[in-house]
Amino acid sequence: MFILFAIVAVLVIVIALKLNETYFILCLCKRVRTKDGSKLEDKITVVPGIVPQFGNNFDLLESSPKAMFQYGRNNLQYAKGKSYLLYFLTAPVYSIATAEDAAELLQSTTVLDKSFIYKLLIAFLGDGLLISSGHKWFSRRKLLTPAFHFNVLQTFNDIFKEESLKLLKKLQCLPKEEIEVNDIVTEFTLNNVIETALGVSLDDLVGSAQYRKTIHDIEEVVIERIFNPLMFYDIVFRMFGRYKKHKHDLKIASDFSSKIIQKKREEYRQKQAQRRDNGEDIDENGKKKRYAMLDTLLDEESKGNIDHVGICDEVNTFMFEGYDTTSTCLIFTILNLALHPEAQEKCRQELANIGDFSSLTVFDFNKLDYLECVIKETLRLYPSVPFIARTCVTETHINGLILPANSQVNVHIYDIMRDPRHFSDPSTFKPERFTPENSANRHPFAFVPFSAGSRNCIGQKFAILEMKAVMVALLQHFEILPVTKLEDLSFEYGLILRTSQKIYVKLRKIVK
C-alpha cells in the first residue's frame, strides 16, 4: 500500500512539474512564452516575489501608496532598467519600462482594453472614455474630439485668464508669503474644468471643496483594493472593506456632477431654440459650430446618440481626469521654478514683451516656448499619471513575447521618461531638453506624459493652455521662492502621482 501511494505521489509531482512549465499553478494562470521558443529569461527579467512559489502575490499585501512607488523602482533596478515580468493571481503582468517596448503597445490597434484596475473605478466614473472599450469607446472618442478643437480652446482662453486673475487676487490678499500649493492649485483647476469644458459657473454651485476631498477619498479606497487581490471581489469588499464610506463618497461625487449637468441642461434647452432662430449654430464659414464638451453631449442626447447615464459617465470622467492631473503638474511646475531660480528668470524674460495679461490670445501663449519647455520637463520628471495599464483580451504577440489571454500590460511612464539612454542625467531638471534642436532625434515614445496612440489624452492641449495661462499670471506678479525641498518629499503611486507631504513655496510680490 505504501509503495502504491509513493508511486501515485511521484506521478502527481511529475505531472504537476510538467504542467507548471505551461501554467503557473499557484498563480492560477498561464505562463508567458517567447515567440521564437527561446528561454523566457533570455528575453525578459522575471522578478521573483517574496514567496517565489506564489509569484508576486504576497509582494503588495499590507502595502501603501508610498511602498507601491518604491516597489516599482526596486523592480526596475532588479531588471537593470529594462522591462520585466510579474505573476499575480490569474494573470501575468508585463511591465514595460522602455520607449522601445512601449512603441509596439501604444501603436497597437488590438490591445486597447483597459486593465482590471480601472474596473474598480466604474462605480465612480461609469463606462466613460477612460474605461470603455470597443465600439462604445470609438464612438465616444469621435463624438468628443470636436469639443477640444483649437477653435473651442480659443473660447476657453478668456475663462482661463479670468480664473487666473481670480487666483492672483486671492494670493495677493493672503496675510503671509508662504502658501500651501496643493490647496490653492486644486481649487483653481477644478474651477477651470467646470467653467470651460462643462460651461457652468461655479458661482451658482456649492460643494466644490467637499468634491475635491471626496475625489481623494475615493482614490484612497480604490488603491486599498488594488493592494489586496481579495478586495477585487465585490462581495469581499462589501463585507470587509470600507464599502459604506466608499458608497457615501460616490454619492457626494455623483450629486455634485448631477447638479452641473442639470443646470447646463436647463440652459441648453433655453438657448437651443434661440440659436436656431438666430442662425447661431452656423459659423462664419457656413459650418456647424463646435461646442464645449457638455454642450456637445447635450446636443448628441437630443439626437438620440447618447443617454443621460452616458453623459454622467463622461462628465465624471473628465472632471476627475481634467482637474486632478492638471493640478498635479501645476504643483510640481511651481515647485521646480522655486527650486531653480535661473529657469524662473528665463521664463520671466520671455514674458517681458508679451503685453498685458488680459489681452493675451491663444497665439500669444503658444509663442512661450521656454515656459512650455519648463512644463514638459516637469511632466517628464513627475508625470501626473505615472503608469497606464491594458488587458490582453486574447493571446497577444508583442515584443517577441506571447502573452496569454487576460495578461495585464503596465506601461510605466515614470520610468520610460527617466531612461538615461534618452535623457542624460535623467533626475536633473533641464527644460532645455525640449528645445527643437534637442528634441529632434529623440525616440518618439521616450516622452509620453499624455500616453500615445489612439488612446492618448483627449485634453492635452486644453491642459497645456490652462497651465500656461496661470503660470504667466503668477510669474508676472510674484517671485516664487523655495520652502519645500525635493529631499523632504516621498512619492506615492496612486491613480495620480502624489507626495506624502504637502508642498509649500513663498510668493513674493514683484514691485513694478
Image: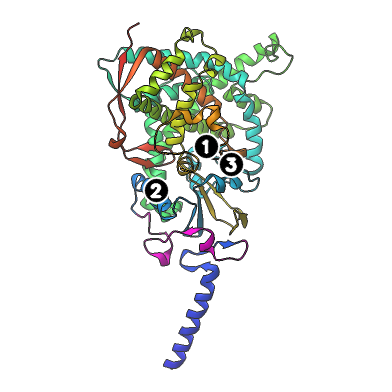
Mark 1 secondary-structure assignment: loop
SS majority, magenta:
loop
Q: Do the residues labelled 2 and 1 touch (CB within 8 Å)?
A: no
**Which residue type carries mark 3?**
Ser
Mark 2 secondary-structure assignment: helix
The answer to whether residue 149 is above or below residue 306 is above
Q: Using the image as rendered, state which of residue 243 and residue 217 is in the foreground.
A: 217
- How far apart are the alpha carbons under marks 2 and 1? 19 Å
The residue sitting at the right extreme is 286
Disc with the residue nearer the chain's start (1 vs 3): 3
- How far apart are the alpha carbons under marks 2 and 3? 30 Å
Could you tell me residue 63's position as x and y percent? Answer: 34, 51
Left or right of 482? Residue 441 is right
Q: How crowded is mark 1: few (under 14 residues within 10 Å), some or many (20 or more)?
A: many
Q: Mark 1 points at which residue?
A: 447
- The mark closer to the camera, 1 or 3, is 1
Q: Mark 3 points at which residue?
A: 132
Disc with the residue nearer the chain's start (2 vs 1): 2
Q: Residue at x 62, y 43 (%)?
A: 107
- How far apart are the alpha carbons under marks 1 and 3? 25 Å
Q: Name the residue under label 2.
A: 73
Q: Are marks 1 and 3 in contact (CB under 8 Å)?
A: no
Q: Does the magenta stretch include residue 240?
A: no
Q: What stretch is highlighted in magenta?
A: 35-61
Q: Which residue is drawn at 42% across and 44% down?
A: 222
Could you tell me residue 121's position as x and y percent? Answer: 48, 42
